[in-house]
């Protein structure tokens, strides 16, 4: 059975620095979309301004679902990457 995306909050532009990184109101899953024609790096940190957990390059005009710990925060190298807190339903 396919999963449906349950939107739990408004979409926002990702912050572009670790000091402004967001947890998306302690989201477990975040839907990310890169609206730009260039790839951008998305980084997950333990807390706002905290130690890096990992990062990945998000291709141009792509969509990813990022699963993270509730307290982990996210930022990108460009505000063209947007995100929203989501869940899944059947």
Image (spheres, grey):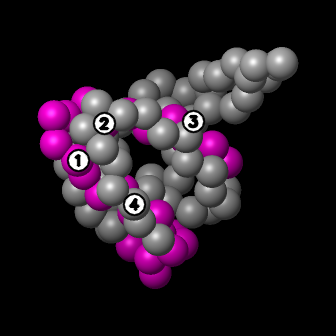
User: In the rendered image, which quarter is residue 1 located in?
Assistant: top right
| Residue labelled with disc 2 | 34
Tell me the residue at 47%/64% (across/down).
44
Alpha-carbon neighbours of circle 2 within 10 Å: few (<14), some, or many (≥20)? many
Which is in the foreground here, disc 3 or disc 2?
A: 2
Residue 79, percent across and down? Answer: 23, 43
The numbered mark at residue 85 is 3
| Residue labelled with disc 1 | 39
Alpha carbon distance from label 4 to label 2: 12 Å
Q: Is residue 60 left or right of residue 83?
A: left
| Residue labelled with disc 4 | 56
Badge 1 or badge 3: first in the primary sequence: 1
Pointers 1 and 2 in contact (CB under 8 A)? yes
Which is in the foreground here, disc 1 or disc 2?
A: 1
Alpha-carbon neighbours of circle 3 within 10 Å: few (<14), some, or many (≥20)? many
Which is in the foreground here, disc 3 or disc 4?
A: 4
Tell me the residue at 39%/60% (across/down).
56
Alpha carbon distance from label 1 to label 3: 22 Å
| Magenta segment | 28-53
């Amino acid at each position: 059975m396919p999963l449906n995306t349950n939107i739990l909050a408004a979409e926002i532009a990702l912050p572009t620095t670790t000091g402004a990184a967001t947890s998306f109101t302690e989201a477990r899953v975040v839907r990310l979309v890169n609206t730009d024609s260039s790839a951008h790096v998305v980084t997950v940190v333990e807390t706002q301004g905290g130690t890096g957990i990992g990062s990945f390059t998000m291709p141009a005009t792509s969509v990813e679902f990022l699963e993270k710990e509730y307290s982990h925060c996210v930022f990108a190298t460009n505000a063209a990457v947007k995100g929203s807190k989501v869940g899944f339903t059947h």
